[in-house]
Amino acid sequence: MTGHVLVTGAAGLLGSQILKQAPPTVTVAATSFQRPLPTRYTGETYHLDLSNADSVAHLLSEKRYDIVINCAGASDVDRCETDHEYALRSNVAIVCNLVEGARGNAFRLFSFSSDYVFDGVQGPYTESDHPNPLNYYGQTKLLAEESVAADNLDACTIRVCSLYTTNLTAPRNLYGGILESLAGNRVYRAADDLFSNPTEVTDLARAVWQLVAMPKLPRVLHLASPDYISRYDLAVLIAKKLDVDTKLIERVNLTDFGLSAQRPRRAGLRSDLAYTLLGRQLKSFAEHL
Ligand SMILES: NC(=O)c1ccc[n+]([C@@H]2O[C@H](COP(=O)([O-])OP(=O)(O)OC[C@H]3O[C@@H](n4cnc5c(N)ncnc54)[C@H](OP(=O)(O)O)[C@@H]3O)[C@@H](O)[C@H]2O)c1
């Protein structure tokens, strides 16, 4: 594939990998907000608040992009629950501003959503299942999805879930959190009633670029690993890999954490449609350890 691609949120967990895995045949530009971009990246760079409509309109009118891959957004579910203004700004305003840009500048838009648009009663979910978010984060992700699906834009929302990387210098994530605790010989409390498909971001980013190269995609696509496991079982797998005593993993219920936001206990994603398009599954957790 060729063209000029803008990656937004490129300092984040997913965005930094999207940037890293970009095919050499495309010209990439990147945005960040409060964090610096990875030092290895030396391409066209913009620092801006994407929730500011004027800033986004200005950026998109200065240069012509063929594709925008939006990795900017909020992933702190509890902060979204207690700070609605932050959640709306980070998850909805950014996407609406990019949708507005896509209307005027005719680029293809890819954005990321979450399995938390579902209520987690009977996951993992397919694209045809009905969203019913339990928390404010999920509500804002669904609002963003709706804005991407409006009009007849060439746009796709990719729902992902429980992202991690085994690269310990990367932004804080699921794997790093568990590893840090176990390696420090500290007890890690893990819910045995919270299920998802933990998905490694390098593999995910490669798959995203494969999809981006395809001329036509569904409006919503699920893209996660095939593993559907509880947070407790995940922590045990990591402990075994590290050869630390699995007694360090304390089996608890979600309610024991007293979190601000309710979690969909059995959310998670079925990615059969994406696997068919890709001609492969994403790698399972065992392959990354
Ligand atoms: N992590 C997960 O497990 C998970 C699960 C499901 C869905 N998702 C979704 O996947 C996407 C990427 O998540 P992630 O884990 O990579 O998140 P992340 O590491 O927190 O990265 C998000 C990026 O968004 C940027 N951003 C936030 N507000 C901004 C603003 N107002 N203007 C410009 N940039 C802004 C941040 O930029 P700076 O760092 O420069 O400030 C950050 O780099 C998000 O849409 C998230 O909701 C993530």
Image (tube, rainbow, N blue to C red):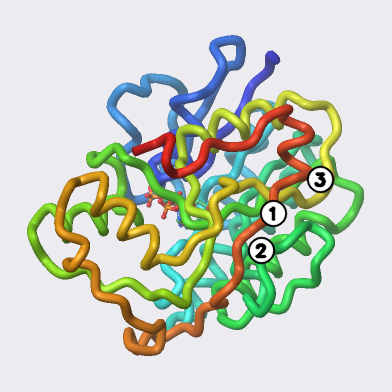
Which residue is at a point 61% across and 38% down the rendered structure image?
Answer: 69
Q: Is mark 2 on a helix, strand or loop?
A: loop
Which residue is at a point 32% across and 71% down the rendered structure image?
Answer: 190
Determine which quarter of the picture holds residue 13. top left
Q: Is residue 76 left or right of residue 62?
A: left
Task: State the CA–CA distance, disc 3 to disc 1.
Answer: 31 Å
- Amino acid at pointer 2: Pro
- Amino acid at pointer 1: Arg
| Residue linked to disc 2 | 124
Q: Which numbered disc, 3 or 1, marks the residue closer to the eye?
A: 1
- Earlier in the chain: of badge 1 and badge 2, it is 2
| Residue linked to disc 1 | 270
Task: State the CA–CA distance, disc 3 to disc 2.
Answer: 33 Å
Marks 1 and 2 in Cβ contact (< 8 Å):
yes
Q: What element carries label 3?
A: helix
Query: Observer-nearest residue: 10 or 189?
Result: 189
| Residue linked to disc 3 | 103
Which residue is at a point 66% across and 68% down the rendered structure image?
Answer: 123
